[in-house]
Image (tube, rainbow, N blue to C red):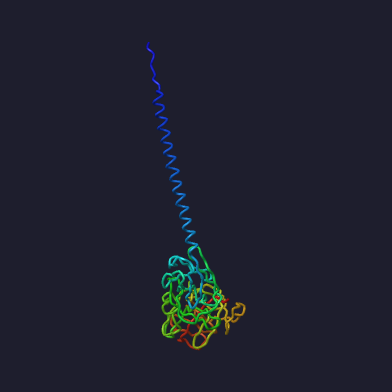
Amino acid sequence: MQKGTQKGITPVIAIILLLLITISMVGFAFVFFARTTSTSGAQIENATQQLVHQGSVRFSIDGMAENKIYIRNMGTNAIGQNTLSIYLDNELSPHTLASDIQPGSVGQASVTLPSCKQMLSGTNVRVTSGGASDSSIRTNSASSGTYPIKTSSGSNLLYCDMANDGGGWTLVSKTNGLDNNHVGTAAINPNNLADLNTATSGYIGDADRLRWGKCYRITSGGITKYAYVTNTLSFSAWWGNPNAGAMWRDTYSTNPADYTTPANDDAGGPGASVAIAYAGRNWARPSGFAGSGLFVGSYGQSGYILAKACA
């Protein structure tokens, strides 16, 4: 019987294999560390560029007028539309710049307001850009007029009463005395709320009205009353009686406890679709009655409603 023969790896081949393995490992380590170093270098470079950019962005709020904010660029880079954020009472507010604000110049930002209340003195204004920030308290109130207001549909030009009862009132509804349908879904037309002219009817819709406040100033037939309302009912529901959380008074007050006069529950027959009621008169009865009968002895009166937060 012959014994099998086994051949081992020669020293030369072993040395060659070891060299190949060593070269492969060295190459892998080189690529790995090169990539790591490259990534770290890029991160450091990006962080450095951000710090340099932030250091070159410096600005201040120079003043406010109406819905305009004036911003002074004290840095070395231009401030553009997309790099600027504006907050009114901590609510991010859309804006447009007339043009990029160049270093050493003052630019104008036109702001779409959360409500008319943000044009009163005391409003907190904060502007941020590129890591920099500046805040200011508004010291002047705007004048009454039409302004861009943020709404559920985006933005609408709405009338703001800034002169009466502390100002900050946003127009939410108005009715022509001949119009039967001015409180329901079909009546929602913010484009008709740019002024107090009651030749046309319009309604902002329940969502925005409820968002803007619980105090209401209602004028009909030349008479004005005030309501404090805690319910979230639609205008097309029974809205103004005390059982629904609505109380009234003849003059405006920021104190809800001062609203102590109940509305008479005079809604007509069962199932009648009624909006605001006061002293037996209805703001709207879309079925069969035209316009407002609020505060006066007959239906068919024109009128309007403004809202704001009481305080």
Query: Left of 57 or right of it: where is 9?
Result: left
Quadrant placement of the C terminus: bottom right
- Given residues 159 and 9, the one toward you in this image is 9
The number of numbered discs placed on residues in the rendered structure image is: 0
**Residue 171 spot, x, y in % from top left:** 48, 79
The relative height of residue 5 versus residue 156 in the rendered view (above or below) is above
The residue at 46%/85% (across/down) is: 302
Residue appearing at x 44%, y 69% in the figure: 102
Q: Is residue 298 visible?
A: yes
Q: Looking at this rendering, what residue extends furthest in the left direction?
A: 2
- Is residue 272 in view? no
Q: In front here: 91 or 15?
A: 15
Q: Name the spot of residue 290 as percent of width and height, x first.
A: 44, 84
Which image quadrant: the N terminus?
A: top left
Return the x and y of residue 254 as percentages of the image width and height. 59, 78
Q: Quadrant of residue 193?
A: bottom left
Q: Residue furthest right?
A: 257
Give the image location of residue 151, x and y in percent: 45, 72
